[in-house]
Amino acid sequence: MALTIGLAYDHKEEYLAAGFSAAAVMEFDDESTIAGLESALVGLGYKVERVGRGVELARRLVDGERWGLLFNFAEGVRGRSREAQVPALAELFDQPYTFADPLTCALTLDKAMAKRVVRDCGLPTAPFVVLDSVDQVSAVDLEPPLFAKPLAEGSSKGVTASSYVATRGALAGACAELLEKFAQPVLVERYLPGRELTVGIVGNGPEPRIVGVMEVSITGGDDVRAYTALNKKEWVERVGYRLLAGETLVDDAATVARAAYLALGCRDGARIDLRCDEHGTPCFLEANPLPGLNHVTSDLPIVARLAGHSFGELVGWIVDAARQRYGL
């Protein structure tokens, strides 16, 4: 009998219909992502049932429903620990689920907390500060250029051309704009001028599998200094993706990414974003323990595709890793 997999997700169109703004639902998944994942799981021989968002999951768990495995890619709606809500529900009701546990999901969404853990483990990351108000800008002891972004957002939300701060005098304006728009602290870090990389990882144990190390290059548009939200949205015209091989940077990046994956407690699969400093050293930017899974546009599936693997293979690896953890 085929294992039944429940899908936990936040459906973008449902939130828009409920009155949420386009900006508020930017991280959520559209129908093509949900249907693509559903199709991949069916193709792997699983029976799939759509569950939906966290409140729907809670209702169904209370009613006694269970699934052989819950495939979680729900982002959550409110709070800096929102990505931990579905994992916490699953654990509360003894429901096996994919990907990271509540602690890791909460930790990694707060970019500064993740950087502190990674830094404490001896891994390279750019110097940074967290600002709660514009009044704190004068005390920032970092030399420009700097980079500013919301503390707890994903999908490059709040990362724009204005995030690059060339002078100390421009920092107050950049932070004021972010504080007002996102109503949360701002992470300010030293801008890393080198190559931007993302590393796909799957599996558990001391040696999780490196799917690939991919370089992200901005090839068009005006947002040339970072992988901004606009660059991601218009990736066909603006972004070049290249799987790296045959250079020392690949091993260096894989080493940092795997160590960060383990230090932060990622499970089953994740994407680790890095950027090189002026010396070419890959430095930790952030971890994505609930990586985007649009079969066409998301970075982890792109890494897998460039490495010669289908989306179905990638999804299979993630599910197999979770099943092995639970002994399913």
Image (cartoon, rainbow, N blue to C red):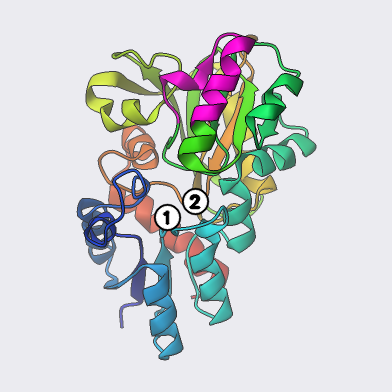
Looking at the rendered image, the disc whose residue lies closer to the viewer, 2 or 1, is 2
Q: Judge by depth and name the residue closer to the eye, 222 or 32.
A: 222
* Quarter holding residue 134: top right
Please provide percent x and percent y for residue 81. 57, 57
Mark 2 or 1 closer to N-term?
A: 2
| Residue drawn at (45%, 15%) of the image | 225
User: Are circles 2 and 1 on residues that touch, CB within 8 Å?
Assistant: yes
Residue 276 visible in the current orientation: no
Per the rendered image, the range of residues in magenta is 159-177
The residue that label 2 is drawn on is 269
Residue 240 visible in the current orientation: yes
User: Is residue 206 shown left or right of residue 322?
Assistant: right
On whether residue 130 falls in the magenta region, the answer is: no
Give neighbour class at mark 1: few <14, some 14-19, many 20+ (Cα, 10 Å).
some
The residue that label 1 is drawn on is 317
At mark 1, the secondary structure is helix
Please provide percent x and percent y for residue 28. 34, 52
User: Is residue 326 shown left or right of residue 112?
Assistant: left
Amino acid type, residue under disc 1 in the picture: Trp
CA separation in Å, label 2 and label 1: 8 Å
User: Is residue 42 shown left or right of residue 206?
Assistant: left
| Residue drawn at (41%, 60%) of the image | 74
* Quarter holding residue 56: bottom left
18 lies above or below 121: below
On whether residue 170 falls in the magenta region, the answer is: yes
Please provide percent x and percent y for residue 103. 64, 59
Determine the main secondary structure of the stretch shown in magenta.
Answer: helix
Amino acid type, residue under disc 2 in the picture: Gly
User: Is residue 306 shown left or right of residue 328?
Assistant: left
Of the 4 image quadrants, the one containing the N terminus is bottom left
| Residue drawn at (64%, 24%) of the image | 189
